[in-house]
Amino acid sequence: MKLKLPFIIGITLVCLGTSIKTLAQQNVIEVTSVRNNDNTVDIKYIKKMPGSYVVKLKFTNFNNTYVSDFEKVLKYDQGDLIRLNPENKEAPINFAYSVSYSLGNNEPKVDSLFQYILPFKKRKKITVQESNNVNEKYYGAEKIESWKSYSVSSKTPDSVYAMRKGIVVQIKNEYQMDTLSRVIFTSKTNSVLIEHEDGTYAIYKGFKKDSFKVKLGDVVYPETMLGVLSKFDNSRHVLHFNIYYYDQNRKVDNTNATFKTAKSPYAYLTPYFYTKEGVIKIVPKDSYTAESNATLITKEMSKREMKQHLKSKSI
């Protein structure tokens, strides 16, 4: 089965008149427009899922106002998008627009020096491999220049832990793996996607169905348990993980692209990891011991979170 790009592309719909709503209640972004007594129009949104979303408004057929296409990163559950002002204040504005959105943050402020922890229990020694891009290797897709992904195999169903503070924005909990054969690759893996404060994302793949210890919208911290590894084949449990972000420098237009020629708008991070062996960038096939310290655990905590953390430690 072909793998999809890491971010989920939302619906696109065209709306005429004074207001717009998504077609079904399960849609993530709901956009409405409100006419004011002074003939201005406020366009607002409600976001029904956790995490950042990029929303785009494309305006057409408007008069008594001037407005260009609009784009914004939505981080809060609701808020204002844009106000339309009338050229003739005595007359109403007429307009039409379409809405599209996607999960992600296209304005990341990536901290490339940030120190992550390994996603395993403290003091566990692991051997890390680099993983191929399966779209490129098996399906002939174009090479992603910055591609960097890691995998760790284990004979036991190890617990997996968060590498950094973030918010859980996506969980896939669909597949029950119980294979007796040797597997090279499968797209049928359960996963969790975590958004970090700087606009990077970490995806962890390979969980046992119904083993997740977190849910959508949860804030996780370094060493927060995410779930338990599933059996990958008859001899291994495997975790795949990587960190990526939207690359502002890549001007990607996949309008007429095919699967093989489509370019990724994402860049992949080669992060620093804090380990017992030191602060390192992973060298494939080398072994490292998971480690952490109080500074790493609390580095991105707010004062309130810090207070709660210290209170929990004292109990």
Image (cartoon, rainbow, N blue to C red):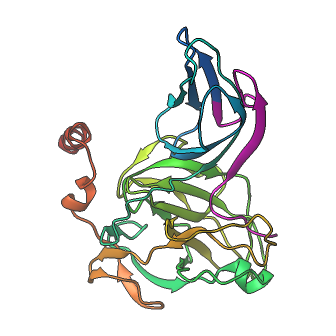
- Tell me if residue 3 is in the magenta stretch: yes
Q: Is residue 231 above or below residue 93?
A: below
Picture residue at 73% right of the left edge, 53% below the top: 174
Q: Is residue 33 above or below residue 291?
A: above
Q: Is residue 213 at least partly visible in the picture?
A: no
Task: Indicate left or right for 237 with 197 as reference.
Answer: right
Residue 221 location (% of width, % of height): 36, 52
Residue 264 location (% of width, % of height): 63, 71
Task: Indicate left or right for 226 with 131 as reference.
Answer: left
Q: Is residue 56 above or below residue 267?
A: above
- Quadrant including the C terminus: top left
Picture residue at 57% right of the left edge, 23% below the top: 86
State the residue in front, 268 or 32.
Answer: 32
Q: Could you tell me how many numbered marks the image carries?
A: 0
Residue 26 location (% of width, % of height): 72, 33
- Tell me if residue 283 is in the magenta stretch: no
Task: Indicate left or right for 107 with 112 as reference.
Answer: right
Magenta residues (range): 1-30
- Quadrant including the N terminus: bottom right
Picture residue at 74% right of the left edge, 64% below the top: 188
Residue 156 location (% of width, % of height): 55, 72
State the residue in front, 61 or 248.
Answer: 61
Task: Indicate left or right for 166 with 233 as reference.
Answer: left
State the residue in front, 149 or 161.
Answer: 149
In which quadrant of the rendered view does residue 261 lie? bottom right
In which quadrant of the rendered view does residue 121 lie? bottom left
Q: Is residue 257 at least partly visible in the picture?
A: yes
Q: Residue furthest top?
A: 37
Q: Main secondary structure of the magenta part?
A: loop
